[in-house]
């Protein structure tokens, strides 16, 4: 997937902008608070129908503009050219158009992008929820049925927790709920285990490339419950989870929450056999986080056959010069299209196919 043209109207401080990026590295250059992240956010929103900063649609509209925002992207996928438009205003809500015709909100023809923000540097050392969301985010993009199972798991979990809060003992209702809980939990765990195995290979390769270290990276999915002995199959997972729920029954009733299941799982990365969360240096953790995100891109290519667009928001400033150079060299040779926001001109401009200068929400392409 490659963006050929992006138009924004009344989106954040980007009152009106049109850019025609190049197919490799595009640098978005500007001082603080000029609109660099807003531009990356516009690309993300037109593809994913939500902001990576957790903003609501009404926050994305330029202050005081009641007509709402409009985003239009023209992109190439294989031999096809696709035009996708998203408009939002408080009065009319959302209007989506695909190739100039009305589109369904769940259309598969949206632009896919992978975004890396300085927040993602906490993927390794942050809370487990961040890592679970990382895996779930990839799987929801790749498989619509995963998203449906995850939604139903969350609903059953909510009902189970409500039951645990109200009750003093396990009744028939709880037993029925437990069966439903396990039925939704097992496919989620299986999909995450598979993804972790695919990602491990990609991350290991990328980490070596981006760090210059010859270390293999191991990735291990960590279950929140003990596994019974035997071959790892969905049945074994179901039996193990069932047993763990039985064992933690009294504790769960006391605390009023479900203590085991995929909502409590995690994954660890290991360098030289040591858990990167406690062993790796800050720089190594940052490189691992970048490798995970680039691994997401490669996984997409393996499964769907094409690369999404990569959005890097202020990531270079977090890496030392050597790692910055290695990352830029990698991006220069990569097949996918990249957008990098940066305050500093140094390093990035030399590798850029196009440079877009951002000042007070106005974007101009630098020539020469
Ligand atoms: N809905 C909105 N309407 C108008 N301006 C907005 C809106 N939302 C955010 N802004 C403004 O957009 C400006 C640019 O924000 P952005 O996050 O893109 O900055 P940036 O160039 O990435 O800066 P930094 O380098 O500091 O991260 C900010 O000053 C912010 O106040």
Image (tube, rainbow, N blue to C red):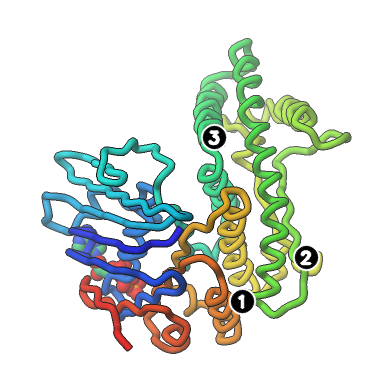
- Element marked by disc 3: helix
Residue shown at 54%/26% (left/top)?
156
Q: Where is residue 287 in the image (x, y as percent from the top left)?
A: 61, 71
The tag earlier along the polypeptide, 3 or 2, is 3
Viewer-proximal residue, 122 or 141?
141
Which residue is labeled 1 in the image? 283
In this rendering, position of residue 168 left or right of residue 101 = right
Taking depth in this image into account, of 351 and 247 the one nearest to the observer is 351
Q: Which residue occupies the extreme front position in the image?
A: 79
116 relative position to 30: left or right? right
Give the residue at x 54% y 55%.
306
The numbered dot on residue 29 is: none
Mark 3 and mark 2: span between their CA atoms?
A: 31 Å
Quarter of the rendered structure image containing ligand 1 = bottom left
* Dot 2 or dot 1, earlier in sequence: 2
Q: Residues within 10 Å of mark 1 (few under 14, many from 20)?
A: some
Characterize the local packing of mark 2: few (<14), some (14-19) or many (20 or more) Cα atoms within 10 angstroms. some
Residue 292 falls in image quadrant: bottom right
Q: In which quarter of the image is the C terminus?
A: bottom left
Element type at mark 1: helix
Instruction: Please name which of the two marks, 3 or 2, marks the residue nearer to the observer.
Output: 3
| Residue visible at 51% across and 63% down in the picture | 120
Badge number at residue 150: 3
Inter-mark Cα distance, 2 to 1: 16 Å
Q: Please determine whether, in this image, residue 161 is positioned above or below residue 219.
A: above
Residue 326, relative to residue 338: is it above or below? below
Rate crowding at label 3 as few (under 14), some (14 to 19) or many (20 or more) other CA atoms within 10 Å: many
- The residue under the point 59% across, 13% down is 173
Which numbered dot is residue 274? 2
């Amino acid at each position: 997937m490659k963006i050929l043209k992006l138009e924004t109207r009344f989106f954040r401080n980007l009152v009106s902008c049109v850019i025609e990026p190049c197919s490799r590295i595009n640098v978005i250059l500007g001082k603080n608070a000029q609109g660099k992240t807003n531009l990356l956010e516009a690309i993300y929103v037109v593809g994913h129908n939500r902001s990576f900063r957790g903003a609501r649609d009404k926050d994305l509209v330029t202050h005081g503009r009641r007509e709402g925002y409009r985003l239009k992207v023209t992109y190439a996928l294989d031999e096809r050219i696709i035009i996708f438009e998203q408009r939002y205003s408080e009065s009319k809500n959302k209007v989506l158009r695909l190739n100039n015709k009305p589109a369904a909100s769940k259309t598969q023809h949206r632009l896919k992008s992978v975004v890396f923000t300085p927040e993602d540097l906490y993927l390794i050392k942050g809370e487990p929820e961040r890592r679970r969301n990382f895996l779930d985010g990839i799987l929801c993009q790749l498989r619509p049925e995963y998203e449906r199972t995850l939604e139903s798991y969350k609903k059953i979990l909510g009902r189970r927790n409500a039951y645990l809060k109200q009750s003093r003992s396990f009744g028939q209702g709880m037993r029925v709920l437990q069966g439903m809980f396990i039925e939704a939990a097992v496919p989620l765990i299986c999909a995450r285990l598979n993804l972790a195995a695919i990602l491990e290979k990609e991350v290991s390769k990328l980490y070596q490339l981006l760090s210059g270290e010859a270390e293999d990276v191991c990735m291990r999915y960590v279950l929140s419950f003990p596994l019974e002995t035997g071959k790892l199959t969905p049945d074994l997972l179901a039996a193990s989870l069932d047993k763990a729920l039985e064992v933690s029954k009294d504790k769960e009733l006391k605390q009023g929450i479900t203590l085991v299941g995929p909502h409590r799982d995690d994954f660890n990365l290991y360098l030289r056999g040591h858990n990167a969360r406690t062993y790796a240096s800050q720089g190594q953790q940052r490189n691992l986080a970048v490798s995970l995100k680039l691994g997401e891109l490669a996984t997409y290519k393996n499964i769907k056959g094409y690369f999404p667009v990569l959005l890097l928001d202020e990531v270079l400033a977090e890496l030392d010069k050597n790692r910055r150079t290695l990352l830029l060299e990698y991006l220069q040779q990569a097949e996918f299209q990249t957008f990098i926001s940066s305050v500093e001109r140094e390093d990035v401009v030399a590798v850029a196919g196009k440079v877009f200068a951002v000042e007070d929400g106005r974007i101009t392409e630098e020539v020469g």
